[in-house]
Amino acid sequence: MNPDTALFAPFACRGVTFRNRIMLSPMCQYVAEDGHATAWHRAHHARFALGGIGGAVLEATAVTPAGRITPGCLGIWSDAHVAGLAEIVGTYHDHGVTVGIQLAHAGRKASAAVPWEGAQPLAADDPRAWQALAPSAEPFLDGWPVPLAMDEAAIEAVIDAFVAAGLRAVAAGFDFVEVHGAHGYLLHSFVSPLSNRRNDGWGGDEAGRFRLPLAIVARLRAALPPTMPIFYRLSLYDGVEGGLVVDDMVRLAAALRAAGVDVVDCSSGGVRGSSGVADMPPAPGYLVPAAGRVRREAEVATMAVGLIVTSQIAAAAVDQGQADLVAIGRELLADSNFAYRAAMELGVPEAHKLLPRNYAFFLERRKLRER
Ligand SMILES: Cc1cc2nc3c(=O)[nH]c(=O)nc-3n(C[C@H](O)[C@H](O)[C@H](O)COP(=O)(O)O)c2cc1C
C-alpha cells in the first residue's frame, strides 16, 4: 500500500496536463496499410483509452516512406494519414487521456519484414523492399544490406520531413510529439560512434554526432505551438564496446533540453543487435536508476521505461525522483487496466474513478460489498 504515491498526481508540461504518470509506451503494431491506421489500431488503442492511464504514445510513425521499419509501419509523411490518426486521438480524448505520437525514421534498420515474418531485411528483389538510409554506408549487422550514406540534401530533407510530420500531428489533434532517437534507428545512428563514421559537420566529434537530433528538435520547437510538449526517446547506452554510455546521454539530454525538449524518455540499446545489454541483463525496473541520473544531471523531466511491471516499481520510480512519468509496454498489452489495478493495489483513494463511469459504478459497488 502506498496511497500517498505521486504516481497518480497530475503532471503538467507546457499547456498539457497528464492526469496521472502512467503512460502507454510506443509499440509498433505492423498492420498499417501504406502507412494508414487501420481498424486494428482503433480497437487496440480503445483498450488503453478505457483503462486509466494518464497518457499514450502512438507507435513509431514514419516521417517518410523510407523511414518505416517494415511495410506495416504507421506513417505521417502525407496529409492523407491525418484523418486515421485523428480518430485514434478522438478515442483517447473522449476518455480523458492525453495522447502523443512517436515521429520516427528507421534509418539503416528500415525495409525489414514484420516480426512474425522474421524481422530480417527484405530481400533486394522483394517488390516491397526499399533503400535504407544512414549516416555511413555501414550495415546494422553482418548480412544486412549496406545502407546509403546520406548527403547534405538527404539530411536536410529528413529534417524537413520531421517538421512536416510534427505539423500533421498538430492537425490530427495530438497533445504532444515524441521524437524517436533510440533503438539504433536513424537519429541514434547519427549519435553513436559505432554507426556514424562521417567526418563532415554531421559526424566526427560529439558536437557533429549530436547535430542532427538537435537540429530536428530546434526546428520542431520553432514550428509547433508553444503549448505542445516535445518528448525525445533516447537509448541510455549502446551496450557495445566503443558505443555510447550514460555519461554521453546525460550530455545529449542536456543539449536536447536547451533545444526545446521537455521530457527525455529513457530507453536503451538497439544500435547493434536488439535492446538490452550484456552487462546489464534486463530485470524489473532496470533502466530506472539511469533515468534518475538523466533527470538530476541534465535537469530535465524524464520518462522511465523497461520492465516496469508492478505498481510498486512504477510508484517508486516517481516517488524517488527518478522519473516524472513511467512508460509501460508489454504489461499494458497483458492488462490494459494496469493503471486501475496499480491504483487499487496501492490503496489510492477513488481508484475506481480511473475507469469510465459504466465500469466504475459497478466495480465500486463490488468493492463496497467486499468491505
Ligand atoms: C511489440 C512492441 C513494439 C514496440 N515498438 C516500439 C516503438 O514503436 N517505438 C519505441 O520506441 N519502442 C518500441 N517498443 C519498445 C517499448 O516501447 C518499450 O520500451 C519496451 O517494450 C520496454 O518496456 P516494457 O518492458 O514495459 O515492455 C516496442 C516494444 C514492443 C514489445
Image: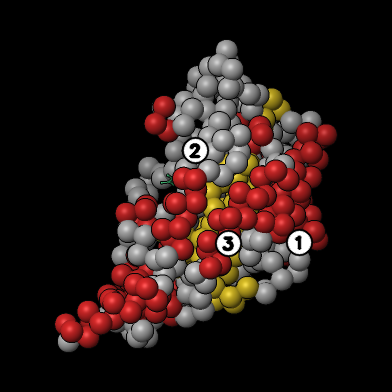
Q: Nearer the viewer, residue 179 or 141?
A: 179
Give the secondary structure at mark 2. loop
Residue for point 32% across, 54% down: 334
Foreground label between 2 and 3 = 3
Q: What is the number of the mark on residue 90?
A: 3
Instruction: Please report the residue visible at 22 percent of the width from the left and 86 percent of the height from the top.
Output: 368
> Which three-letter amino acid code belongs to the residue tagged 1?
Leu
- What amino acid does circle 3 point to? Gly
Q: Nearer the viewer, residue 84 or 249?
A: 84
Q: Earlier in the sequence, mark 2 or mark 3?
A: 2
Q: Earlier in the sequence, mark 3 or mark 1?
A: 3
Label 2 – label 3 distance at C-alpha: 20 Å
Q: Residue 349's spot in the image, x, y percent?
A: 35, 86
Identity, as a three-letter code, of the amino acid under mark 2:
Val
In the image as oriented, which residue stretches furthest toward the right?
Answer: 153
Q: Which mark is residue 31?
A: 2
Asked if 334 appears above or below 104 in the picture, the reply is below
> In which image quadrant can residue 320 be found?
bottom left
Residue that numbered label 1 is attached to: 224
10 Å crowding of disc 3: few (<14), some (14-19), many (20+)? some
Give neighbour class at mark 1: few <14, some 14-19, many 20+ (Cα, 10 Å).
Answer: some
- From the viewer's perspective, tell me whether residue 225 is left or right of residue 332: right
Q: Are marks 2 and 1 in contact (CB under 8 Å)?
A: no
